Amino acid sequence: MTPTNYELVVDCCLLAGRLMMESGAETYRAEDTMDRMAISQQLTESQSFVMPTGIIFSGNKTLPTKLVRINNRSTDLERIARVNAVSRRLADEDITLEGAYEELKEIENDPRKYPFWIQILAASVASAAFLLLYGNKLMDVPTALIAGGAGYAVANLLEEKTRVKFFAEFLAAIVVTIIATLSVSLGFGVEVDKIIIGSVMPLVPGLLITNAIRDLMAGHFVSGVSKGAEAFLTAFAIGAGVALILSF
Amino acid sequence: MSYIMQGILSFAAGASFAIIFNAPKKSLFYCGIAGMTGWLIYSFVFQLSEDPVEASFAGAFTIAFVAHLMSKRFKMPVIIFSVAGIIPLVPGGSAYNAMRNIVEKDYSVAVEYASLALMISGSIAMGLVFAEIITQVWMKILGRMKGRTTG
């Protein structure tokens, strides 16, 4: 085996870990992936400490310990799958370290997302499906379709522009509530509450809550508590947006 | 509502959430299946026990097994399938009601809803973790048995 470029190994591990955490992977998966990549490159004593807001990684006793900051988090399952595949192929020696680094850079620069209109359509369909699953009448479906899609679109566009997630969710909840109350008062819908619940489902941080408790149970206390805080703030923003309109 | 209708709706919810979470294209159909399985088990148990916490646990437990099988089959991380699967079970409704009551200063009702949301999401997480541990132990036993017969 040729001597390995350890600096590149550390960079590669950090890049993989950062991509995974930015895409909403579980904390233990990010740590696992980084450790597996390091071990496959003869860094057997590596230590990684992953938090939702940053990663500390140390290769061995002589290498400098490095830190990366994680600024924005979203859910992007495709990215997790691709990073996971690269780390597996590196561990199986299908690709070289340089090749793996190149591929990770490519994953970082090429988001490969569904077109925005398909995402909005999916949010509409999900809202309508939830509305019916929670036992509501067919008559409310059109309102939920419109409100769910509009809420998701507003949340995403504003988050891109303002970079403040809570503000975006707050305004999205306001839009959803306005559409729901208007349609009920005009006679197109029946139950305001159920329409709102169905339509805010694409925004509600249900996944974050579940992941937070999972991290806590796995012993990742820092991650668990900070994910829980994020979930609480998001839920509060949505609740505040809804209540602001309903109180008029 | 009939189970067939519920199945179709929860399939739609799971698959469309998979699109929102940007799941790989070829996994979309199976994400929908995971969502459908979880919801049908949930709704079946809910009819028997009338307790959303128990029903969520049963649903999440089943989803974790299904997701594990799918991840083995497609060589993708388990989280892709389990995330889409648990979405219909997630207590969005109670979390919403809790927050709405807090903002409207109706604190005692809010605490009730918030505890329910916490219990449900806790039971979902427990279901996932339990199933994961059981499959891990099972794989270990299977590996050991194979090792004994061949070597």
Image (spheres, coloured by chain):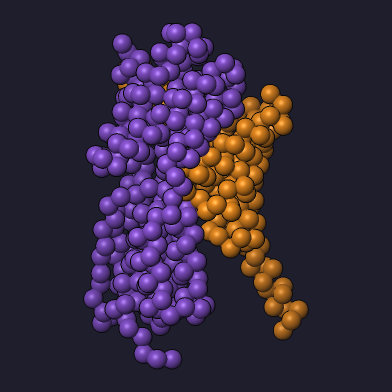
User: In the picture, which quadrant includes the N terminus of chain B?
Assistant: top right
Q: Residue at x 44, y 57 (%)?
A: A79
Q: Is residue A228 left or right of residue B72?
A: left
User: In the picture, which quadrant includes the C terminus of chain B?
Assistant: bottom right
Residue B7 image-quadrant placement: top right
Q: Is residue A56 above or below residue B147?
A: above
Whole-percent x, y for residue B71 in the image = 60, 58
Whole-percent x, y for residue A115 in the image = 44, 45
Chain B, hue in figure:
orange
Whole-percent x, y for residue A187 in the image = 49, 8
Q: Residue at x 40, y 62 (%)?
A: A107
Residue A230 image-quadrant placement: top left
Chain A, hue in figure:
purple
The answer to whether any part of residue A233 appears in the image is: no
Q: Residue at x 26, y 62 (%)?
A: A68
For the residue pair A30 and B30, the one nearer the viewer reads as B30
Whole-percent x, y for residue A32 in the image = 44, 66
The answer to whether any part of residue A189 appears in the image is: yes
Q: Is residue B20 above or below residue A190?
A: below
